[in-house]
Image (cartoon, rainbow, N blue to C red):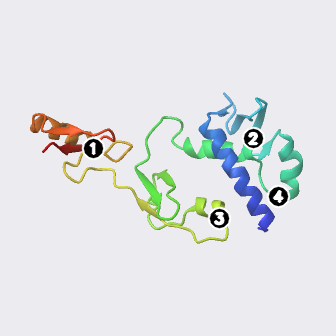
Amino acid sequence: MTTQQIKGLAERYEKAVALVEQGKVAPVYGQDGVYCVLNGEGYAYLVNLAQESCTCPDHQYRAKKLGIPCKHLIAAQLVRERQQDGGRGAKPRRRYQCDRCGAVEESDTDLTGQRCRRCLLVDPTGPRGRFQPLDERCDTCGGELDADGRCLACEAEAEATYDGRFVREGDGTVSALW
């Protein structure tokens, strides 16, 4: 790949992630591998993953010239990857975090030690990080942690056990009153 292709792919990937996060990508009912993708101006484009085609002008002209996919095609591929379980909504087994850029990925397969693709897209010339599993269980009780990494069961027990001698701070931590 040339530097121009890498830059173009990185830009399109970032825009594709934004489209997916905004919910602007949806499968077309009854057509396997065909997705409808809305752009920022509200135009809808059809993406066919089997044919690697998109109805947008970028795919028809600039993407073919550079030899890289358009953001709509990348967005549809991202949605397809996230729906590998057939749309049943099953959770992946583990979450992994890049030790360099902090990107978090969910996967059914073990990603421990694998190189981060996001590091390559963000800074193609810089070093790439490796994925490490996120600790999703409380060290004290073994319970599940919330999105902020706190164990609500342990916090509730601390508040109940000490009859108000502990106070919950504004940031959610529990500390003793002296």
Which residue is identified by label 3? 123
Q: CA distance from mark 2 to mark 1?
A: 49 Å
Q: Is residue 19 above or below residue 105?
A: above
Marks 3 and 2 in Cβ contact (< 8 Å): no
Q: Amino acid at mark 3?
A: Asp
Residue 143 location (% of width, % of height): 24, 45
Which residue is identified by label 1? 173
The local crowd at label 4, few if under 14, some if 14 to 19, many if 20 or more residues have their Cα within 10 Å, is few
Q: Quadrant of residue 18?
A: top right
Which residue is identified by label 4? 67
Look at the numbered disc 1 and give the secondary structure of its residue: loop
- Determine which of the numbered discs, if any, sits on residue 3 in the image: none
Q: Earlier in the sequence, mark 4 or mark 1?
A: 4
Residue plotted at (59% across, 59% down): 118
Q: Is residue 97 above or below residue 141?
A: below
Which residue is identified by label 2? 48
Q: Is residue 119 left or right of residue 30?
A: left
Q: Earlier in the sequence, mark 3 or mark 2?
A: 2
Q: Is residue 109 above or below residue 115?
A: above
Q: Amino acid at mark 4?
A: Gly
Residue 124 location (% of width, % of height): 67, 67
Circle nearer the viewer, 2 or 4: 4
Marks 2 and 1 in Cβ contact (< 8 Å): no
Q: CA distance from mark 4 to mark 1?
A: 51 Å
